[in-house]
Amino acid sequence: MHAIMRWVRNMRIELDINGEVRELDVEPRTTLLDCLRDNLALTGAHAGCEHGVCGACTVLFDGVAVRSCLMFAVQAQGSAVRTIEGVTPGPGEMSVIQDAFCETHGMQCGYCTPAMVLVAHALLANNPEPTREEIVEAISGNICRCTGYAQIVEAIALAAERMRGANAPAELRK
Amino acid sequence: MKAAPFEYSRAADIDEACALLAADESARVIAGGQTLVAMMAMRLARPTRLIDINRIAALSYIRAEGDAVAIGATTRQCVVERDALVAAKLPLLARAIPWIGHAATRARGTIGGSLANADPAAELPLIAVTLDATLSFREGGKTSDIKARNFFMGAMVTALPAGALLTGVRFPVWSGKVGVGFHEVNARRSDFAFVSAAAQVELDGGGACKRIALAVGAVTDFPVRLESAEAELTGSTLDDAKVLAAMTQALTGVEALADLHASAEYRKRVAIKLAARAVADARDHALGKKHAH
């Protein structure tokens, strides 16, 4: 059967992107990933496999880690999306988790790194004291071909320790 | 890896979703989209219209209904994973959910989406068949029920009529001394199962099996209950040798799937072992013994 290319109108959506409300016109078939990269120039969300296997496109969707290649931007209407560009406390600074990745060499080529950092953010927001198994489980959907994962697990454990320390009353800090 | 163009409609309620479905036979419903969007990216699916049911509040719930727990079609897998009622009343479902995909896909993936997708290796169809769940769907203004055992007809093929919307599923709750077991073999954690097995048992005061439900997934095109083994084991104390013999008997005649990952012979051999382990786990669980899983 001959496939007919359809012409489909763009749809207007409103998204909270890293704390800023943005209005966009997108074609329905545009994934959230392509919308972030092409419409918003937020290229920290990486396009790896583009069919839900590698995890490199992970973003925080209403606070929860999801694969941005497995949803269409129009579905995100009215939702809050946080990308790696939105985790820093200020320009030129890094989050505690990003710092920990640097210090433990939790990255090599960097392709998987933004997603790994966001998954760590999602994990530590709900579980300030994860076990090694819980960290491994949390990153199990994210493929890294460089590190062998050991330093990534170490980075998340270090970040968890620091964040616990930062939130504890002064007398309990080491 | 870009989907072909399609129209997009965000349905406000069940009736609107049904009307949109009825109006276009090439339209598809999108719930969590964790399979459908990937299929569309690879252009294995090219719907003319996507009907998004994610915002229909009436499809997202977990509640006790008589002797069952009812779960709405768009209830996220991650919500079911953490739900106290499910943990207390549907221990087999609670045991199996963490095996579905990864945390990031369970965050979007839904109960109804996985059932309607009917992947032979999926966990939710296996649990629905094991527990004799009832699925509800809406079509032409009326709601109908179908048993899970009649719902799955082939790989990615169900008895859901064209134009019908799956709305929810009811899992019967067992009472008494109940134990559950679940096992799966795959290439990587959370990858597709080569073989999976689920068992739920109820023991009497003397430790004999009053009731058993047992099924295997990924072995054939859809999950199968091992009814002959269930009959054989009811009334017994489920000792290991008897369980293994019953599994061997029940699975010998089954024509197993073969693919790149696993031969039919492998699948059958592993299914026998996993089913036996699932029953042993369920027995020990019901007896209050600590077990490895």
Image (cartoon, helix red, strand yellow):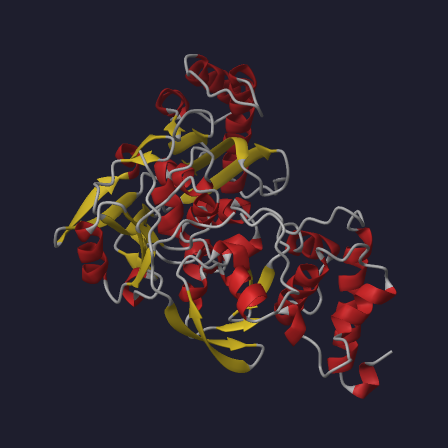
Residue B176 coordinates in the image, percent (x, y):
39, 45
Up-down relation of residue B131 to residue B75 (above or below): above
Query: In the displayed image of the protein, which residue is found farthest to the bottom?
Result: A170
Query: In the displayed image of the protein, which residue is found farthest to the left?
Result: B141
Residue at x 36%, y 47% (from the top left corner): B175
- Judge whether residue B52 can be spotted in this image: no
Residue B33 coordinates in the image, percent (x, y):
42, 52
Up-down relation of residue B272 to residue A34 (above or below): above
Q: Is residue A132 left or right of residue B185?
A: right
Of residues B114 and B162, the one drawn nearer to the viewer in this rendering: B162
Disc count in the image? Answer: 0
Residue at x 44%, y 60% (from the top left corner): A72
Of residues B168 and B95, the one drawn nearer to the viewer in this rendering: B168
Residue B114 coordinates in the image, percent (x, y):
40, 45
Q: Quadrant of the C terminus of chain B?
A: top right
Of residues B156 and A125, the one drawn nearer to the viewer in this rendering: B156
Indicate the quadrant where residue A170 lies: bottom right
Of residues B136 and B243, the one drawn nearer to the viewer in this rendering: B136
Q: Is residue A110 left or right of residue B185?
A: right
Residue A30 coordinates in the image, percent (x, y):
46, 59
Q: Is residue A130 left or right of residue B219?
A: right
- Judge whether residue A44 can be spotted in this image: yes
Indicate the quadrant where residue A36 lies: bottom right
